[in-house]
Image (cartoon, grey):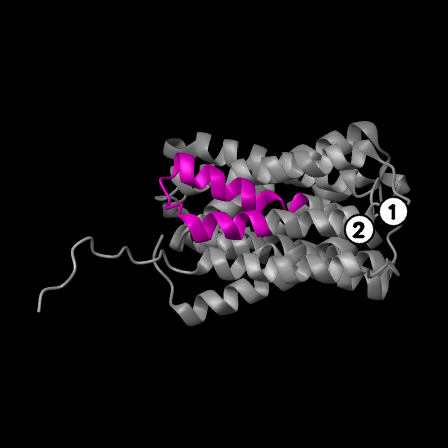
Amino acid sequence: MKQISTKQTVLLVAFLVVMWGINWPLSKTALQYTPPILFAGIRTLLGGLALLIIALPRLKSLRFRENWYIYLISCLLNIVLFYGLQTVGLGYLPAGLFSAIVFLQPVLLGIMAWLWLGESMHGLKIVGLVLGVVGVAVISLGSLAGVSSPIGIVLALGTSFAWAIGTVYVKKAAQHIEPLWLVTVQLIVGGLFMTGIGTGVERWSAIHWTGAFIWLLLVIALLVIAAGWLVYFTLIGSGEATKVGSFTFLIPLISALVSAVFLHERVTISLILGLLLILASIYFVNRPRPASRSKSAPTA
């Protein structure tokens, strides 16, 4: 994967954070019109088919026979488990709280990238990761008032682990795969799988094909899923996974704020405190390693 400029990185990170931040309240709203598993499958499949139109001119770079297992494992972790657990879990917890728990992912990603990818781990980065998890914990605990759903919390944690492992796997195993094809294949395969499961356990007649639902479906499929995953893997492939992951700490904040405005979920002091901790986390994770001082003093 080729390197991208600092300006491109900033723009892509901003797009990703906003799109994935609004995903949670949008998905929570869409679930009023549709069963969860069918919704997870349909939106993912639509995103994959949209990217297929763009990817087909680059068919030679697919190399499916060589890399089929990479596509399959990435699909299982990043699509089937991530979106499956996420969509079902949103039925048990408020969108802001659920996303806050899921975004323990940057901490898990930082640890896994250090252990399995050989990324650097120094004092400031450790401080940043700790502040990030504390910030997410503060937001989560503050939102737990009146909420009692162990199933929802377990599903959120499962979503987080699946995403972290999937990201590390893609970074480690898929450096020679075209990002566009990686996202396209995993979305189509994962979408077909979840749509099939949903067809078996849910009813298509339970979907209310209103204008509002169709609009939500298209925004989520095209911008959040198709464009979002393509941007995410582009960023992961061009830089340190831990640094990219640190910016995703902002996503639960955006989710909580948008949920407060449009879904009337509460904005609490814990949310504001969590924001400050998350911002500090991003600062420390992205600071360069401190230069080591020379052991010998300079001579006159």
Residue placed under numbered mark 1 in the picture: 145
Q: Is residue 249 magenta?
A: no
Name the residue type under label 2: Gly
Residue placed under numbered mark 2 in the picture: 142
Query: At 56% from the left edge and 66% from the top edge, which residue is drawn?
Result: 14
Per the rendering, the mark at residue 2 is none
Q: Which SS class for mark 1?
A: loop
Query: For residue 37, what is the image quadrant?
Result: top right
Query: At 80% from the left edge and 51% from the top edge, which residue is drawn?
Result: 142
* Residue extending furthest toward the front: 300
> Is 294 on the left-hand or right-hand side of 288?
left
221 in relation to 189, above or below = below
227 in relation to 34, above or below = below
296 or 154: nearer the eye?
296
Query: For residue 201, what is the image quadrant?
Result: top right
Name the residue type under label 1: Ala
Q: Is residue 148 visible?
A: yes
Q: Position of residue 31 (x, y in %)?
A: 84, 47
- State which quarter of the image contains the C terminus: bottom left
> Is 63 on the left-hand or right-hand side of 103?
left
Q: Position of residue 53 (x, y in %)?
A: 54, 55
Query: At 67% from the left edge and 54% from the top edge, which residue is drawn?
Result: 221
> Is 137 on the left-hand or right-hand side of 170?
right
Report, in whole angstroms, how far the alpha carbon at label 2 lies from the one at label 1. Answer: 7 Å
Q: Kindly indicate whether the residue at mark 1 contacts the one at mark 2 (C-beta within 8 angstroms).
A: yes
Q: Is residue 190 visible?
A: no
26 or 68: nearer the eye?
26
- Residue interval drawn in magenta: 102-131
Query: At 63% from the left edge and 40% from the top edge, which residue is drawn?
Result: 160
Mark 2 closeness class: few <14, some 14–19, many ≥20 residues within 10 Å: some
186 or 61: nearer the eye?
186
